[in-house]
Every structure is written in C-alpha cells, then in structure tokens.
Amino acid sequence: MKQFVPAAAVVALQVTASLAEELLPVQIRAPSPAHFSDLVANNTLDFGCRPIAHPTSDGKFELQALLTRDQISWLHGEYSSDEAITVQETALDKRQTSGKAPIGTGDRFSGGSLTPSGLGTKASTASIASILNVDEINSALTGLANAYPGAFFKYNLPYTTFQGRTSVAAYTGAGPDTSKYRLYLSAGMHARERGGPDNLLYWVSDLLAANKSGSGLTYGKKTYTNAQVKSVLSAGIVLFPLVNPDGVVYDQSSGSLWRKNRNTRSGSSGASVGVDLNRNFNFLWNFRKFFSSSVSPASTSPSSEAFYGTAPESEQETKNHVSIYDKFPGIKWFMDIHSAAGTILYSWGDDVNQSTDPKMNFLNSTYDGKRGVTGDSVYKEYIPAADATAIKRAADATVAGMKGVGSRSYVSQQAVGLYPTSGASDDYAFSRFWAEPGVSKVYGFTMEFGYSTNFYPTTAEFNNNIRDTNAGFMEWALTAIAVGL
C-alpha cells in the first residue's frame, strides 16, 4: 500500500479548531485483522490511541480511524477493487453535537478551598456537568491535600514542560513514607483523550471520602465495602493525573483533537508540532534498529501522531513520569489511563508473548530487526509464566468490574494487538526489572476507556466513563493486592 499523500491545500492546513470538523470517523471492515496490516503501517493516518481490530457480529473485523475527506477519498480509491475490504464514513460526527461534555470554566474548587467529590459516594442519579480544565486539575489536588492533611500529599515534579508549566503528582493511603507505595496510575498523556484525569481524581476523592465516613462505594451495579476501600488505600496510591498539560490546554481551547505535547523543536507549525509521549519511553525506542522493517510501531516524522521524539525520554513530561519510580521505589503495579477503545491492555506490546525461551527477549541483540511481526515464529517476547498469569488475571478482573457497572462491554488483551508499539509507558514499566538491575518488578497496564475514536464524550458518556473506570480501578487494585504487592 502506498502512503497517503495529501493535496497541496491539505499540506498547508494548520492544526486549528477547524481541523476537528474535518476529521471524520471512518469504519474499515475486513475478514481478518491481517487485512489491515498495510493500512496500520501507514503513519499518515490517525487510528486513535492505537489501531484495534474489533470483531463484529457477522464474523468480520472493524478498524476505526479519524480521517480528512481527502484521506477518505484516497482510501476509497485504494480499496475500490478489493471486495473483502469496505470503507464506511459515519454520517454524523457526534463529537460535534451540542451534547458533548463541556470543559469547565473558572475553578469549581476555588483554588483548593473546596474538596472534589466523585460519583461513588452519591446517588445513582448524580452527574458531573463538565470536564475539568487544567487549572481545576491542579486545584483538585490542592483541595484533597487541604481536606485530608497527613493522608494526602502532593508535590511538584522536577521538570517543567516545553511551555513552562509545572506538573504535579500526589500520593495517598500509606502515609508519608514513599517506600511503602505500591500502585501508580497516570492520565492525560494524550491531550485529546478527555476525561482521563477526571476519572482518576474522582476515584481517589471517593476513596478518601468513603474511608473517612466509614462507607462503601457504588458505581452503577458494582458495590464495594468500606473494608475494600481501606484495603485499596493501604496499598498506597501514587497518582499523576495530568502528564501532558501543554497539550491538554491546547486541545481544550482549540477542539482540534490534539494528541501530542507542544514541543516545537522538531516542527514549528501544524501537525509537525509535538511528540507522542507514549512512544517516547526507553523501551525499544529506536524501533528502526529493534523491529522488523515491515512494521511501524512509532514514527520518525514530526508530522505523525506517533512521532517518537529525538531520543528516549527526550520530553520533559516523560522524564517527570519516569522520576516517580525513583521517588517511590516500591511501586509494583502501574496503569496508564487512555481512551478511546474499550480495552484493558497488558504487556508486552512489542510482540506476542511466550514463556518457553528466556533468551528470546527485548535485551538480546540477536533479535534486533526481527521483532514486531505478530504472525510469525521468528520472534516472540519472553514473559515468565507466573507473570503472564498474574497480569492476565488482573486485566480480566478489571474488565469484569467495568462490565459490571452496566454501561457497556470491555475486553482485555495483550497490548501488541493488531500492531506492535515501541516506547510505551506500560512496557517501560515492566521492562525496568530486566533492564535496570536492582529495581522492583512492575506490572504495566493501559486502560482504554470509552468508545473507539470517541475522544470527546457526551455528558452522559463522560459520567458513564467515570463509573466504569472507577469500578475498574477498584478491581485492578484489589486483584493486585490478592496477587501480591
């Protein structure tokens, strides 16, 4: 398949608020995931957070994308003679309807004098009217620190962003000793994936409120006792709710479906601005060396949504994310919160798992240039059998909890899925144990809440996402405790 080459007018198009109106959801259907292989290798197309082949009721598979009209026309032409693959444009882009959840204005927490309150401690009819803006995310952390002194701690991370913003992390549940914290959750890495920081902050708010009042939590049809609340808190929770503040500020102000950060060193205008932070971690980052040339786990093009940056951890946001492992050396479980796909992903993301040949692993240079082809037997990523069982158990439990809320269905799957990834936060978390002697083993997960490519949820979807994810967090944490901290 040839790369899509846009018309001159599209090349000149700047990424502004109007761009969101020109990106339309498209469904590509085929008999098998293998039919999408060439398509997902095309770094000029936007498949959301990552390409996922969803099974359909008629036994086929569906790949969803966000494309311009020029790209849609090109796609129709590319597959016009292939009866096995069909391309269908959604008639109405519901992200642009009046029902989408608005971004909050002002500061609902008044600089931290008011405390955030989630949905798990409220009546089933309760609703949150708007998505937190960037200032409110920081204000929420201050509000929790003020409401729970000695139990909730926040601190500034060491690296300021490209645009000069200070990022904030927090920890709660296991007291001031940072060596006692076992769970780490982050959100807001991809700017357009609205609601991720809200999901995390409202869950922690629920835990603290229920712990103080002696009550349990309810998310739709899922309920949790006060004993379970206390158990989860005692595991020690570290939260980094807004990894990419520059990108989120831009997306919230422009409505442009912006994904990357706002670093202009590799490109100063339009789509060339920014780095995909979830391809910037130090795990097989140099994909041209480590992976087969037939796959594209990231991109070297600054204009790509998957641009990997100029070096592993080249971005300040990535450095901040990694610094948390140093401050909290006892972390054993990590979850990165994304949208929109309806999946829970577990390691590895570079190739299919295997537990029989320990020498076939990401550190072995013998396999450089061979990784990432999921249908072959040349390379598969080693994972100890006990680890494979543990992470699958936690992913399945998380999915069961999210389904149990009653809003929608979710699935668990290995992160490699339809195509491999490099430089991702979840694989970096898991890889540290082997790459950096002496550090703790950390199981890495990615939660993809919501529906495919629906990055701007309606108000109803936004509230459903909060309940779904919060039940998922509870099940994930409880399973982590059961497996072992």
Image (cartoon, rainbow, N blue to C red):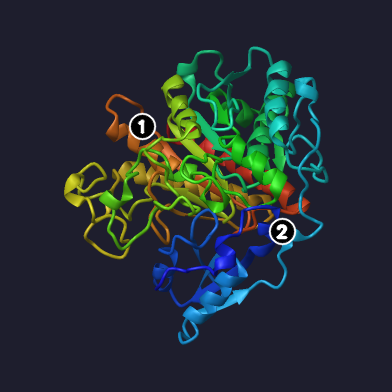
Q: Quadrant of the C terminus?
A: top left
Residue 126's label in the rendered image is none
Residue 462 x %, y %: 72, 49
Taking the spot 78% from the left edge, 60% from the top edge, the residue there is 97
Taking the spot 51% from the left edge, 33% from the top edge, the residue there is 317
Residue 95's label in the rendered image is 2
Taking the spot 65% from the left edge, 30% from the top edge, the residue there is 204
**Identity of the amino acid at label 1?**
Lys
**Identity of the amino acid at label 2?**
Arg
Q: Is residue 184 left or right of residue 113?
A: left
Taking the spot 53% from the left edge, 53% from the top edge, the residue there is 49
**Residue 254 to residue 436: above or below:** below
Contact flag, marks 2 and 1 (Cβ < 8 Å)? no
Occupied quadrant, residue 471: top right
**Residue 288 to residue 188: above or below:** below
Q: Earlier in the sequence, mark 2 or mark 1?
A: 2
Q: Which residue is mark 1?
A: 441
Residue 397 x %, y %: 52, 46
Q: Residues within 10 Å of mark 1 (few under 14, many from 20)?
A: some
Q: Is residue 380 left or right of residue 302?
A: left
Tell me the SS state at disc 1: loop
Residue 298 x %, y %: 40, 52
C-alpha separation, residue under disc 2 versus residue under disc 1: 40 Å
**Residue 251 to residue 245: above or below:** below
Q: Quadrant of the N terminus?
A: bottom left
Residue 475 x %, y %: 56, 41
Does residue 354 show up? Answer: no
Q: Residues within 10 Å of mark 2 (few under 14, many from 20)?
A: many
* Between marks 2 and 1 in the image, the one whose residue lies nearer the viewer: 2
**Closer to us: 234 or 33:** 33
